[in-house]
Structure formats: structure tokens, C-alpha cells
Amino acid sequence: MPARWQQRLTLGLVLALLLVRVLTGALASPTPGPRDPVRLLPPDRGNLAVRMRGVLLADPAPSGDGSRCRALVQLPGGTTEASFSPCPKLQQNWHVELEGTLRRPMPAPHPLLAGPAERLARQHTYSQLKVERWRVLEQRHAPIAAIRRRMAEALQRQAGAEKGGLLAALVVGSAAAPLPAEIRAAFRAAGLSHALAASGFQLSVLLGALLPLCRRLSLPVPLQLGLGSGVILLFVLLAGPQAAVLRAAMMAALALVLLSLGRQGRPLPVLLVVSLAMLLWQPAWLRDVGFQLSVVATAALMVSAGPLEQALRRWHCPVWMAVAVSVPLAASLWTLPLQLLHFGVVPLYAVPANLLAAPLLTPLTLGAMGLGVLALVLPAALPLLVPPVAWLAGLLLALARLVASWPMAQWQLGRPLPLLVGLLALALLPWLIPAVPRMWRRWALVLLAVVAALHLALLWGDQLLLVHQQSGDRGRNLLVARHQGRGALVSTQADGFSCRQAGQLATGLGLPGFDWAVLLDPVPSADPDCWRQLAGLVLAEGDGSTPLLPGQRLASEGLEAQAMGAESRGLALQVGRHRWLLLPDPQALWSWRQGAPVPSPDGLWLGFRPRSGEQRWLQRQGIGQVWLSGSRVGSWPATGRSGWLQASL
């Protein structure tokens, strides 16, 4: 065998072994250590009153509706997430004593929902502490956190909460400088989320301004290398060691070294080497959404931006427009499978939004960085220099909100099956990689049509989905009925958390909203606007709405709910040609048994555990399917404490 082929074979085997190592590490389930706080919890009890001493790993940050704050706490045997209400004035690196209730975080009841157990497991944390009392033992200084805090406070004080928060996010990323949920949503819908995330864009802007200036001043190469390395290190310290930040920093550092040696590195191999090295160090980063989007978007710019620019110029597109459009278009096409896999939505106007935002982002980023430095070394100059940069920030905010308000700004296609996402990526590759022969593009079009047809068929079919999550003594149930691309909702709780979960389900299922929603909760909702934005018509027991009376129905095309009795919260649900009975409590079952005989339904849902006599009576009714929220009874399917059931009708 020739020496060249031996070298290639050896290199291929080494790469294969490294990939196997990365995949096995990424797919392995994280487990707590022997002294982790979760080990204190008895297996037969969910909660435990504890008193613990630890160190705050971050400033407490608002979560959910803002009524609570949470922060990771380092304990002698591991970490836990502390939850405070109201939010305390505590800071990173302070030593504290906490008293409260330790518990295991709840897993997500459905793959389309975000669960605290999965979120914390990615941070190697397996318990939560609901803090009731706390006291500070020692106020230790955290220099980097203090710098971030000082920058953010100075910018917000001078430019206002929104504009100043945006400027702070451009300096250290939105993870270190939290922004209001409304601004995050607007940037996400406009396809501008990358501007808020600390990533390679900010670093490229900084180095792109620094290195040409160093060359113009004829600085020695070692000094240029030192200044560039200092900028990279400062960027990592301020933004935090996130996967996307480290990827950008390692690539920039490697590029600096090559430039100092007078060599031009090949960008794509550099990206592959850096990504593989990071995954060998931390295989779990393969599951990190930010890392995935960062690597794929960077590869898009290296592989497809140039050919797309040339193609646009061949189609008589002006040079400046071809250059401006090719970059966001390449990034949008390459990240499309990941957008669908993780979010189920596509920002439809991402390319024009980025085209409009491009003239603002570079001066804004440089201006925000400069203001951040001035906030530390010369704060007295901020009132003079902040207004023009804040004006640019206001323009970017207005642009994001304008694009987000356009019709179908977020094209809700639903989250496809992972297999379909893989096939979609395979169908896009011949169009995105110039080296692929053109003959493959015909087959790629066929594959793309097959993927679209299968996904639309799944979205268009009739379906009933039950999601159950036990919360204390009360069970939270969401029943989603789907018919020909539309949906209706029945919820046993009217709280804001249930509404947010219902919104996540709608997005993941490709529903722009629900035709109607019925809330079977006698307690009024604390956030009725959330439900009104989610459904065209909301019927809630607790807000004074007129309940459904016998003979009345709530209906849209193919979806119908009808009251089963005047003394019952039970509903007869019609989905297409299929009829289900929804019985949330024993009273609803008793009312059905005592009422007039009805035709045997296709299915039945029980929101409680029936007694033995009720079980025997139900078995005699010859019902096709019986679903239970909670633990299993006999052979009937059940959700368990946290889970879901689904039927295609």
C-alpha cells in the first residue's frame, strides 16, 4: 500500500475513534457524584428540610414571571439551584447559609416542553432548594462579576433600561446581561438573536478594528499578537466560558498565531479542529444549542457565503447587495434544520432584517465596547458619549420590533421528527456545498418534497395529546386536540405557568394558536392576557365566564366541546369523527353515570384515580381507550407523575 494511502487510512481511523469518543460522551446520561446534595433526599420522599452553606456561583437572576430569582450554589459535594422569593440583593462569590426545602427538579412532562431537570442536568446540577431564610456569612469579591455588573448598571443608568440593557448585551452577551423577555422575543422573531448572544461576531468586530490599526501604526508583530490575545482573553472573561464563546476565542487565537508566523490558515479545517478539541474536552457540549448554532453558522460563512455572493452577482444583483445578502442567507439556510429541531419556528424575515441591521451592528458593537471600558476607567465621560450610541441602539430595537410585528414573522412549522430533520439536512447539502455534483440536486429536491409531505401529513392529522404534571396535591393537565392543522385546548389549571406550557406545545406542534380554550379551574387566572393571546376564545370558570350548560357547545370546524351536565365539569370532546369524554374529577364521573345513557365514546380521560367499583363499571362500558393522569390502573395507559399520552385519531 502506498505511503500516502497509509497516512490517510491512519488519519481516518484516528478521526473515527475520536468521533466515537465524542458521541459516547455526549450521549451518556449525566449522573450526580457520591456527595451531591440530591443524595440527601430519601428515595421515598420528594422534599427535605435542610440548612446548607455554600458559595453563590452567579448573581440571582429573575426567572419566569419575575416574582422569583434563582442562582446556582456551590456546596461541598456538588451544586444546587437556589430559588428566592422575593429576589435578594446577593452577589456572586458570597458565602451564604440557606434554609429551605430541598427537592429533585421536575423533568419535562413532554419533549416539546422545557423542564428544570433537563436544564440543570446540562449544568451538572441535580437538585433545587426553595429558600425560606438566608444569611450572608462572608462577602467575598468576584472581580469579573463586579466588572460586568458595573458596566451594565452604568449603561442602563445613562441610556435607560431597554437601550442600556441592549448595549450591555452587546458587550458581554445576554446571558451575562439579562434583557426583558419582550426584547428577547422580538429579536428572536426578527432573526436577530445572534446580535444578543456573545459569539464570534463581537470578537470579529473587535479584532477587525484592532489588527488593521496595529498594522497602520507599524507595531511589532509580537505586540500585535499580545494585544490581540489580550482582547480575546478579556472577551472570554466578560462573556463567560460558554461553549460558543470558547469556540470563537480558540479560532481567533489560532488565527492570530498563524498570522504571526506569516501563514494563512484554512478556516474550515481550523473550525473542525477547534470543535473536535472542545468536544473531546467536554462531550456534553455537542447537545448545547448555542454551540451547535455557532459551529454550523460559522461553517456556512466559510463554505456557502462566497458561492452565494457569486451566484447573486451572476443574477445581476448589485455587488453591495450580493455581499450583504449572502452572509445572512447562508447562515439561515445552514441553521434551518437546527431551528426546526429545537424551536419549530423559522424567522421568515431573517435575511431582510439582517440586511437592515448590518449597518447598525458594527458601530453599535464598537460603541458599546468603548462605553463599557469608559464605565470602568472614566465614567464622567459617559453622559457626553452615550446619547449617539443609545440612539443607534434605539434604531436596532425599533427595527427588531417592526420586523417581529410583520405577518408570519415566526413561521410556525412545528418541530419535526429527528429523522425528518436529518433528511432535511441531507436534502439541503447539495445546494449549500459547491463541491457536490449538480446531478445530486435533482434527488435532493425529491427528498425535500418527501420530507415536507411527511411533516405536513403529521401536522394535518387528527390527534389528541394529554400532558400531565403533578404539582403538590394538584395535577396540571393540558389536553390538546388537533384537526387539519388547527387546535383546541382544555386545561385543568388557569395559572400563568400552564399558559406558558400551552404556548410551548402550540409552537412545537406547528399551531399559530388555538381556536378556543376551556379552563376548568375555579381559581381566576393571574395572567388572563396570556390566555387571550393564546386562543381566539377563552372560556374560564374562575373569571366569571358563563359556563357551558347542557345542550350548549363550543365549536370550530372539526373541534367541538359540549357540557355533559349542569353539575359536572366533564366535557364531551369531538375531534373530527371521534368522540372523547373528559372527566377531570370524581364528580364528573358520577354525573355521567347518573345521567341519561350516551353512546359509547371512542375514548375517555380520567383526571383522577378511580376506585375499584368505578373501574369495574368503566370496564363494562366497552370504551376503546381509557387514559389516566397519574399512576397506572390495570392495563389502562397512564401518564405517571410527569408524562404524556398521545393518540392519532
Image (cartoon, helix red, strand yellow):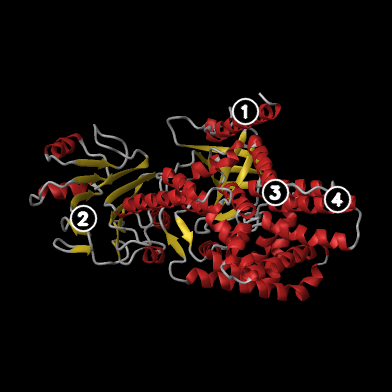
User: Of the residues under marks 1 and 3, which one precedes in the sequence?
Assistant: 1
Expressed as whole percent of the image width and height from the top left, the position of residue 606 reads: 24, 44
State the separation of the CA atoms marked 2 and 1. 55 Å
Would residue 128 be seen by someone viewing this image from the given angle? yes
Question: Which residue is found at the position 48% from the left and 51% from the top?
Answer: 441
Choose between 15 and 217: the one closer to the eye: 15
Determine whether label 3 and label 4 are within 8 Å by CB: no
Name the mark nearer the viewer: 2 or 1.
1
Q: Residue at x 35, y 52 (%)?
A: 453
Q: Which residue is mark 4?
A: 226
Residue 243 horizontal side relative to residue 258, left or right: left
What amino acid is labelled 2 in the image?
Gly
Q: Is there CB contact under 8 Å for labels 1 and 4?
A: no
Q: Secondary structure at mark 4?
A: helix
Give the residue number, with chain letter if any, for mark 2: 576
Q: Earlier in the sequence, mark 3 or mark 4?
A: 4
Q: Earlier in the sequence, mark 1 or mark 4?
A: 1
Q: Can you give x and y, in whole percent of width and height, for residue 563 in the image?
A: 18, 58
The residue carrying pointer 1 sits among few (fewer than 14), some (14 to 19) or many (20 or more) residues within 10 Å by Cα, namely: few
Q: Which residue is mark 3?
A: 267
As drawn, the label of residue 13 is: 1
Q: Amino acid at mark 4?
A: Gly
Residue 519 in the image: state x and y as whole percent.
31, 58
